[in-house]
Amino acid sequence: MKKLFVIFLAGVFASCTNTDPISENHYVWTNNSEYEITFSSIGYGVSFEDEVISSKESFAIVFSNFGETGKAPETIETMTVGFDDGVRVVYGGTLVPVESHIPNVFYDQPFNPTWEENYEYKKLGRYEYQWTYTFTNADYEAAKAIVEGE
C-alpha cells in the first residue's frame, strides 16, 4: 500500500509542472498609406503607446505566452490610430462586452485594427505565429468618415 501511495504522490507532483510550450506571437503593423500614423494599443500582452509608423514602414512586437496556439489580435482591448493631418479614432476590440462599450470608441467598423479577421495570419513554426495588419489609404478614409460623422 505504501508503494502505491508513493507512486500516486510522484504522479501528482509530476503533473504540477507546467509543460505547455511557449509560443511566440509576432504582431506587425505596416503602413502602406500616404500618411504618417501614430498609434497606441491597450490589451493583454499587446500594449504600447504612441508608436509612429512613417509611410511604407512597419512596427513589430513579439509577445510570448504558454500554449500551442497563437494569441489573436482580438486580445487588444482598444487601439488609438492617428494620422498626421489630425484625424484620430479609438477602436474597441471585439472581446469587449457590449455593455462595457465606451462612448466615442468605435467597435463595429470595417477597418478596425483590433479584429482578427483584418489581419493576415501566418504560422512561422511549430509554436511561432505572425499577425500582420496593413494600414492603407482606405483606413484613413474610414477614420475620416467616422470623425466627420461624430
Image (tube, rainbow, N blue to C red):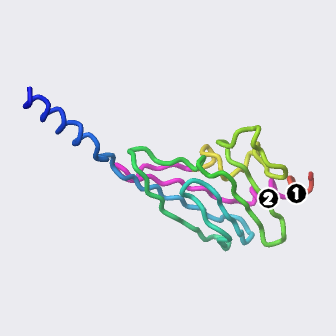
Is residue 132 rendered magenta in the image? Answer: yes
* Left or right of residue 3, residue 117 in this image: right
Residue occupying image coordinates x 58% and y 68%: 58
Residue 76 at x, y percent in the picture: 62, 52
User: Which residue is situated farthest in the front direction here?
Assistant: 2
The quadrant in which residue 6 appears is top left
In the picture shown, does residue 6 fall above or below 86?
above
Residue that numbered label 2 is attached to: 89
Residue occupying image coordinates x 19% and y 36%: 9
Residue 20 at x, y percent in the picture: 33, 46
- Please name whichever residue, 89 or 110, is drawn nearer the observer in this view of the structure: 89
Residue 127 at x, y percent in the picture: 37, 50
Residue occupying image coordinates x 67% and y 74%: 54
Q: Which residues are magenta?
A: 120-144
State how far apart marks 1 and 2 are (Cα).
7 Å
Check disc 1 and give the amino acid type: Val
Say what secondary structure mark 2 lies in. strand
Could you say which disc has been placed on residue 147 in the image? 1
- Please name whichever residue, 96 or 30, is drawn nearer the observer in this view of the structure: 96
Dot 1 surroundings within 10 Å: few (below 14), some, or many (20 or more)?
few
In the picture shown, does residue 110 fall above or below 87?
above
Check disc 2 and give the amino acid type: Val
Residue occupying image coordinates x 81% and y 63%: 88
